[in-house]
Amino acid sequence: MKKRHSFRRRLFAGFLLASLLPLLLCSAMLLQIFRLRLDSQLEEESREQLDHVISSLDGLYRGFQQTALALQASPYVAPALSRGQRDSTTVYSELYSATEGSRLSAQFDLYDRDGVWMYSTGSGPVEPVMPTQWGVLYAARQSVGLAFTQVDGGEGNSAPLFRGAARIAGEAGEDAGYLVITLTRADFQRLLEGTYGGQSDLLLLDRYWRPVYASQTALAGRMAVQLREQLLAGEELGQEGEEYAYRAAFQEEMGLYAVLQRPQALNRDTRGLLTTVTVGSALVCVGLSVLMSLRLSRQMFYPIERLHSAIGEVVHNNLDVYVPPYQDDELGELAQRFNGMVVALKRNQEQLVENQRELNEAQIRMLQAQLNPHFLCNTLDTMKWISKINQVPQVALMSTDLADILRFCISPDEFVPLRREVEILRRYMEIQSIRLSGKCRLEVDMPPELEECRVPKMILQPLAENAILHGLDGVEDGVIWVRVRSQGTQTLTISVEDNGRGLPPELMGPYTGPPETSGRGHLGLYNVDTILKKHYGEAYGLRLGSRPGGPGAAVTASLPLWKEEEIC
């Protein structure tokens, strides 16, 4: 015997999962979103601060470059350096004029071709002699513009940390001297103050990742070594789990890397605290979910159990069962609906015999109604033979045609060959010709290969009747033409044309239904168009126009080209 699982247990488990899973998932997602949001905000702030730092360095470099270009273009500086002149008022004037915008950012010194100090914009200590075969002066001789190098100038705010130099050429292109730019710790502090946040630390490294300047002097050596080791190992700066996050940017002209150090958005202590809070909240929610699930499962189980027992009674055809709605909620409403369903089922059973009896009577009346058309056909045949006996051929012909049309109408076939449809139309036109004393006749133009095309029954007779009633009214020699054509291999067109008075211009084009003022005069066109659209879709139907080559109207029916052996 198959083991029966407890619905109450499954209901309890379902409530528990439905309450806990979304909570745990939402907690994890919120924690992750919070962390990503903080990381994104940290990254954006770091990028903006580094942009400010690089922008300050770019401005400093442009000032240095303008100073070097101004001194190189001066007609007094190169000759004075070549002749070894000192204390030249003109040279000092040129030097102070060239360093007008950058004098507060660094100290500018002029050395002659042998590396001997000549002029300076500052009052601080200078190197009286600098080597020209190595160091910054050698780098300036090898480059076109400014060359920069790191300097280990010791401790203190006035200690030089970074130095740049530019070659000053004489009139013949020979070395006349050098412009030396010296940046101290105080210069960097003044330049970069306010470009990064108060929680961040900035480190400037040269292109070989040697420390140049650090916002905190104690961090320079440790940070430079740590970052260099991470880069050599192929690791990213500021990995997950570290206390600090790093972001670096490069100032290409001066060859400086700006590295920004910021505390991680979520460090170990913060992550531990968030984890503890999350686990504690989850445990509390688990306890609450268990209690609520037990209560809900108990409230839902007993009404469902009563309904289950009542349904078992209904299965055994006991329709006197009743479930009391103890609860005023959806389950109580369900019990009331069940009681109403049982009452309705009992009433339906009582009416079943009566309905079956009425159905039998309706079938008998329908069979009797089917006898009437056959009686009419037999009566028309009797009239035909009586007319022949009494030598009244027109009555005999009309009786024969009307009988054929009636048999065609009551036949069960929904689609008929086009040949048969045209034959019934000929019968109808014979009756109309006798009725109108020969004032109208029918001409059919139908290729033999299209005679077996399948068309809906009785679509030509309404079109011809419409032409007689509205087009040939008052015409002495009326003609109705039926032209059958194929458009490619997919479409069949049947045109019913007359030589009557034609159609008004507002009716030309695709048939859109009878006008409101026309009453029931064009009901035949409406019925045929509706039949075609119902069978084949909105792409097919009737189109109204004028008869080509003469007066009169033309009604064209388009439908798929479907022969008896093909699938519609």
Image (cartoon, rainbow, N blue to C red):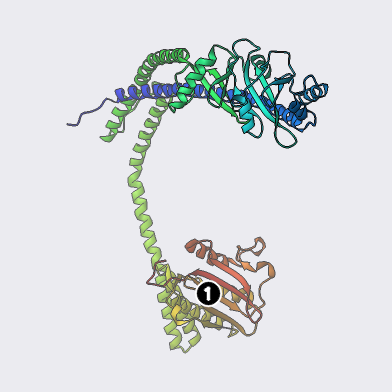
**Split into 4 quadrants, where in the image is the C terminus?**
bottom left
> In the figure, is residue 543 to the left or right of 99?
left
Extreme residue in the bottom direction: 391
Residue 516 lies in quadrant? bottom right
**Residue 358 seen in the figure:** yes
Q: How many numbered marks appear?
A: 1
Extreme residue in the top direction: 156
The structure residue drawn at horizontal position 59% and vertical position 69%, both measured from the top left corner, is 543
Q: Vertically, is 551 above or below 515?
A: below
The structure residue drawn at horizontal position 45% and vertical position 73%, both measured from the top left corner, is 406
Residue type, mark 1 in image: Ile
Mark 1 sits on what residue?
A: 494
Q: Vertically, is 282 above or below 59?
A: above
**Split into 4 quadrants, where in the image is the N terminus?**
top left
Q: Vertically, is 545 above or below 189?
A: below
The picture places residue 17, in percent across and down from the top left corner, at 37, 24
Residue 515 lies in quadrant? bottom right
The picture places residue 348, in percent across and down from the top left corner, at 36, 41
